[in-house]
Image (cartoon, rainbow, N blue to C red):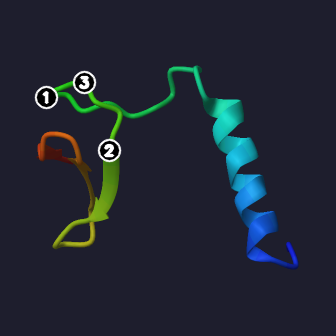
Amino acid sequence: MPTSILGEVDGLLDVAAAGAGTGSALQCPSCGSSHVAQVLGDNGGISFVCTACGHSWS
């Protein structure tokens, strides 16, 4: 466990950089944007929302 939040951020940035360009990013089926948020649905299921166009799906 890092002793500071900066250590945690550095670790997350390393993970993000390692996954960049691998095609593993989730994309909006409506507009193709990779700006997608994962949200908890009303019944506890998981849904996704595109923060670029507002399209939602599960």
Q: Mark 3 points at which residue?
A: 32
5 vs 25, left or right, is right
How far apart are the alpha carbons under marks 2 and 3?
A: 10 Å
Q: Which mark is residue 30?
A: 1
Residue in the image at 71% along x and 32% along y: 18
**Label whose residue precedes the other's in the sequence (1 or 2):** 1
Viewer-proximal residue, 2 or 43? 2
Viewer-proximal residue, 6 or 27? 6
33 vs 30, left or right, is right
Q: What element carries label 3?
A: loop
Viewer-proximal residue, 26 or 35? 35
Q: What element carries label 1?
A: loop
Residue furthest to the bottom: 3
Q: Quadrant of residue 36?
A: top left
21 vs 35, left or right, is right
Q: Which amino acid does label 3 sit on?
A: Gly
Q: What residue type is labelled 1?
A: Ser
Quadrant containing the N terminus is: bottom right
Q: What residue type is labelled 2?
A: Val
Q: Is mark 2 on a helix, strand or loop?
A: strand
Is 45 placed above or below 1 here?
A: above
Q: Do the residues labelled 1 and 3 touch (CB within 8 Å)?
A: yes
How far apart are the alpha carbons under marks 1 and 3?
A: 6 Å
Disc 2: CA contacts within 10 A as few (<14), some (14-19) or many (>=20) = many
54 vs 22, left or right, is left
Q: Which mark is residue 36?
A: 2
* Relative image position of residue 50 (x, y in whole percent): 22, 44
